[in-house]
Amino acid sequence: MDLSSLKRYAMKKTKLEDFGGSFYETTYTLAIRIANRTNYAPVGYAALQDFLKRLLITKLRIVKELNTTQYHKSPTISKPIFIVGLPRTGTTFLQRLLSLDPANTSPKTWELMDPVPRLKEDLEKDAKKRIKFCQTNIDMLLSLIPHFEDVHEMGSEIAEECTVLMGVDAPALVFNFHSLLEEQDEILKWDWTEAYTNYYKGLQIIQHYRGLRQDMPETRRFVLKAPPHLGVLGDLTKAFPDARIIWNHRDPKDCLPSFASLIRAGQDICEGSGTIQLDVIGKHMIQYAQNMYERGDNFFESSISKTSTCRGAHVLYQDLIADPIGTIQSLYKDFGYEFSEEYKSNIENFLEEDSKKRNAMKGKKKKLHQYSLEEYGLSDSDVDDKFDWYMKKYLSSK
């Protein structure tokens, strides 16, 4: 597999040639180099190739859309909320809750996966077709790794991570994220400004066509989330200078093994369970956490202030789970947002339904999601020694 052949395939399928910019070449080249040296199972390697081809096709179509539609005249993406933090710290739960506010919205999986309509003469029909196509792909993935949904809920019409759309510039999802962790230090050295600028434009496309389908402008605040943002917040805020950034915190002794199990679920399909070294996953998790904590801490210490256009806040996982409404009320007070009675009612209804769903799941198995540090060659003392500074600063004192 090589980038040139993948690009030729995408150009042939779309009859387009302009990929826009050059940052994507660095990311795809690295992803392909790692894939070619990794012991992928045949089905995993084929799935990765298909994944990369689809992303390049989507990238070509986005660039064409931006070149033929005057998005510089479109409304700006104003004061978007970005939720960051290590995986398994409640980022998805918080995004779901914030999206319940009538003043907020989140892009859905199908919009992020394929933001440019194909049937512009009938946008409702087009949306239905894209939703169906997206769900078909999700169902196919889950048929291969059904246990993945135990770790991360998936669906075409639910809010999803920024990484789905940003994948056109930086392909890092279930099929290869585990292997990219080997090169995380190199990846964090890159300038991600172009990728975030392109993401901003991608959100404008989503916003534009939502407005056309609704026959009214989409003016709600975007609620966005992806754990990897934490490592490159300086580049993110160059494209989104008025972002509201929420950093979720959880005891690393809990979130690290949970994250490791998420990585393992993706690696199962790609390489086969017989080749997975759990202690290697554990070492990568420690390195990843160290990078994210240090870079996130540096950004919040140096770039977040009440005099800057960018604002920040912190959420503790245990507070979010114990008191979701109180946690969000505190966030809204920090950001100067109105917490309406309608929004409060929406949260209460969601929590009631979510509780019913989780109780039903518990009836089918002993635990929703099982994991431990020891599985991945780690101990409590390993984590305590490495991240004592983080826990004292962000967990003990808050």
Image: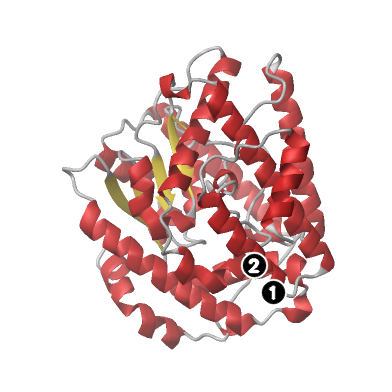
Whether residue 138 is situated above or below residue 182 in the rendered picture: above
Q: Position of residue 394 (x, y in %)?
A: 30, 66
**Residue drawn where x is 20% and y is 43% of the image:** 308
Disc 2 vs disc 1: Cβ atoms closer than 8 Å?
Answer: yes
The three-letter code of the residue at mark 2 reads Arg
Q: Which residue is mark 1?
A: 37
Q: Position of residue 126 (x, y in %)?
A: 72, 23
Going by the picture, which residue comes out furthest to the left?
A: 307
- Quadrant into which the N terminus falls: bottom right
- Quadrant into which the C terminus falls: bottom left
Picture quarter containing residue 18? top right
* Distance Cα–Cα, label 2 vs label 1: 7 Å
Describe the element under mark 2 as helix, strand or loop: helix
The three-letter code of the residue at mark 1 reads Arg
Q: Position of residue 230 (x, y in %)?
A: 40, 58
Q: Which residue is at the front of the view, 223 or 35?
A: 35
Q: Which residue is at the front of the view, 131 or 295?
A: 295
**Residue drawn where x is 53% and y is 44% of the image:** 351
Whether residue 284 is situated above or below residue 377 in the rendered picture: above
Whether residue 137 is situated above or below residue 105 in the rendered picture: below
Q: Which residue is mark 2?
A: 33
Packing grade of label 1 (10 A; few <14, some 14-19, many >=20) is few
- Report the colour scheme: secondary structure
**Residue drawn where x is 71% and y is 15% of the image:** 122
Task: Specify whether residue 375 is in view.
Answer: no
